[in-house]
Amino acid sequence: MANTSPRRTLTLLSTPRGGGRDAMTCQFRCGNACAHEVSNTSDNPYFNDLLTSTLSRRGAIRAGALGTLVATVGVAGTTAAVPAAADPGTEAFGRGGYKGGLRFASVAPNSEDALTVADGYASAVVVRWGDPVLPDAPAFDFDNQTAEAQAKQFGYNCDYVTFFPLGSDRGLLWVNHEYTDENLMFRGWTSGDSAPLEQIKIGLAAHGGSVVEIERAGRTGQWKLVTRGRRRYNRRITAQTRMRFSGPAAGSGLLRTAADPRGTTVYGTLNNCSGGTTPWNTVLTGEENWNQYFVGGNGVPEAQKTYLTRYGVSTTTAIPSGNRRFDRVEERFDLAKHPQEINRFGWVVEIDPFDPEGTPIKRTALGRFAHEAATTTLTRDGRVAVYMGDDGRFEYIYKFVSKDRYIKGFDRHNRELLDEGTLYVAKFTGDSPATEIDGTGRLPADGAFDGSGTWIPLVSGNRSFVQGMTAEEVLVYTRVAADKAGATKMDRPEDIERNPVNGAIYAALTNNTNRVAAQVDEANPRVSNKHGHILEIVEERNDAGATSFKWALPLVCGDPADPSTYFGGYDKTKVSPISCPDNVTFDAEGNLWIATDGNALGKNDGLFAMPLAGPERGHVRQFLTVPYGAETCGPLVSEDQLSVFVAVQHPGEITGATPDNPSSHWPDGGTSQPRPSVAVAWHKQGKKIGS
C-alpha cells in the first residue's frame, strides 16, 4: 500500500516553527500558537529555583534505576494489578520482570512519500478520510463533498487510536479527528468571509471522532475496515453532536449561555488530540487547541479577557488571521455575542463505543486546558487515576484521582467515578546544583537529569484548594489555578502513559524553542529546546494515588552526534536520531514506542521503540517513517503484539501545496489527493512486533 513516488519540492512561503513543523501545519492545527506570545506569564519558579541543599541522593532516581512498580494498563483500558517487578536498573530485572529488548533493523531517516516499515514487516491502510462509516454513507468524492456526506464518513486528520475487541478477529477502532486543513481539502479554498458556507459545514462535520468496526485479515496481524453488514456500532462524532456536562462544574454560571441557560448541554467536540480508555471500556478524548475556533475575543466583558488571554485567545482582534469562521454557520463561535461558549470546550470527553446512541459526556472534574492524554490506571486501593498533559509552552502536567473505588462489573457505579475526586498539578524539583544545569543539555556531575516532585491538590469536588478561586473557577480556569498553586512550567507536555511492566509514568515533552537560559532547569535542561525529551515518573510506593514521586529523563532527543542529547546511557553511535516526541505507548514487554511530530532534523516523522531497562535501555530504533509532510499519531500496539496501528496525520501538509499542486499522493498513489489515514503494520512471518 505504500506510495514510493518521489516527493515534490515546493517553494516555502514561511519557515517551520516550534521544531520542524511546516508553517501550514502551524496555521491549521493550532492557529500559529508558537507565533503568539506565551500565554503563561506567571512567575512560578523553575526547577532549579526550588533546589534545596537537603535533598538526599539516596532516594533520587538515576538513569536506569527505577523503583519497584506494580500497576498495568491493558490496550483496551482494562486495568489490573500485577506482581511487582524487580528494579529495572539491576541484572535481576533483566532476568525477571523485564521481558526482553527489540530485534529489528532500524529504518533509515528519509523524505519519501511513503509509509516505510522495518525489514520483514508489511503495512496497509485500515481506514482513510472519506471512507464510509455509517452504512448509508456515500462513496468519497473529493470534488463533490457535502457536509451531509462527511457526517457519515471517516473524518479528516486522525490522531489518538484505540481498540476494543469483539472476539479474536473483530473489534472496534476509535479514532480522533483533530483538525481540518481546508487548504488541502478544497480546490481554490479561500479563508474568511469568502469561503463557501458548505465548506465550513464540511469542516464542522470532519472534526470529532469515528467508531469503525474492523476485522483481521486471515491469521495475520493485518486488519481491514468492515464494509458489509450492519456494523451496528459504527458512529461519527462531530463538532455538532449533542453532549452533556457532568461533574462539579456542570450547571455552573460559567458554562451557561443563551441557548443553554442551565449550563448542562453542549454541542460538539473540537481539536481532539490524544486520549485514553477507562477500565469500563469507554473512550476518553481530549480537546486540545480549541481556542483557535472562536472570533470576537475583543468584544467580551473586560473581566473575562484575562482568562481568555491565559488560554491563548486574542482579546484585541475581532477575527484572527486564518480563522475557519465557524461563526458564519453557528453564531455561538462569536464570543462578542456568546462570551461563555468558549468555556464549554477544553474538556475530556467520555464516549461509549458500544452505545452508538449514547450521549457523550464532558467530565468537568478533570479540569479545562489544552488536553492531550487522559490515561487511566488504578491506585493501590482501587481508585481511578487519570494522567493528563496540557500541550502548550510552559504548561503543566496534571493528575486526577477519583474519590471512590472501581468495582469490576458494576457499570452504573463506575461511570460516576470521574465526577468526584481530586485534581492535582505537578511540581518538580531537581537535585543538582543550579550551576550544573547550564542550558547546553550537558549531564550534571551525578550523571543524570533527575529529582523529586509533588502532586499539588487544586480542587476536590466542591472544595477549592486555590486561594481566591471557587471550585467551579478552578475547573473552568484550571491554568490560572495551576499558576496560583506554583506548578512547574514544562516543555509542551503531550501524551502521558503508564508502562504495563514497570508501572512508571512516561510523558512526552515535545519541544519548547521559547525556553531561554534563565528558564532552564533539570527537567527542561536545554535552551531553545527544539527536539524535546521523555520524562519518567515513579510515584511513592508505586501507587498512582500517591502525592509524591521521583523523576528522571531517560531520553533527551535530537541528533545522537549532538552532545546535548542523551539516550539512557546507551552508545549513541548505535541509535536512531529522534526529534519531537508526541505520542507514546507500550508493548506487552514494556518497551516504549514513541511517535514524533515535527521532526526538526529535516526528515519525515516516524515511530520509534526503546527498551527501558537492561543492557538495551536507551537503544532507540526507528520502526517506520510516515509519508512526506505527515505526522505520526496513535500509536497502538495490539495486546497480542501482532499489530501496530499508526494514525498518519496531514500527509502532504507543506506550504505551497494545494489540491492542484499536491506534495503527497499517499495513500492511494498516482495523481490522487493525500488522505489522512490509519495504517497497520505487522510481521510478514506472524512474529510479534519488534521481535
Image (cartoon, helix red, strand yellow):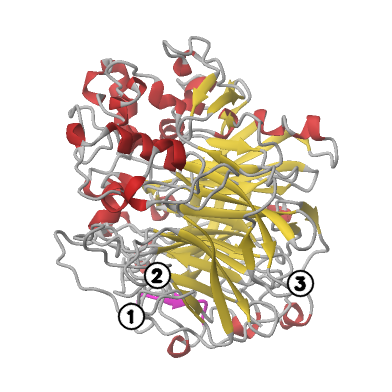
Q: Which residues are magenta?
A: 562-569
- Observer-side mark, 1 or 3, equals 1
Q: Does the magenta stretch mainly form a helix, a strand or a loop? A: loop
Q: Which residue is mark 2?
A: 605
Task: Pinpoint residue 603: horizontal percent, then vertical percent.
Answer: 33, 75
Quarter holding residue 318: top left
Say if residue 618 shows up in the picture: yes
Task: Pinpoint residue 88: horizontal percent, then vertical percent.
Answer: 68, 74
Q: CA distance from mark 2 to mark 1?
A: 19 Å
Amino acid at pointer 3: Ala
Dot 2 crowding, Cα within 10 Å, few <14, some 14–19, many 20+: many
Q: Which residue is mark 3?
A: 86
Q: Which residue is mark 1?
A: 562
* Residue 199 marker: none
Please give the name of the residue rendered at 79% of the width and 39% of the height, measured from the top-left corner: 406
Q: Quadrant of the C terminus?
A: bottom right
Q: Quick check: 161 left or right of 557?
A: right
Q: Nearer the viewer, residue 217 or 66?
A: 217
Please give the name of the residue rendered at 75% of the width and 42% of the height, measured from the top-left corner: 280
Quarter holding residue 290: top left
Secondary structure at numbered mark 1 = loop
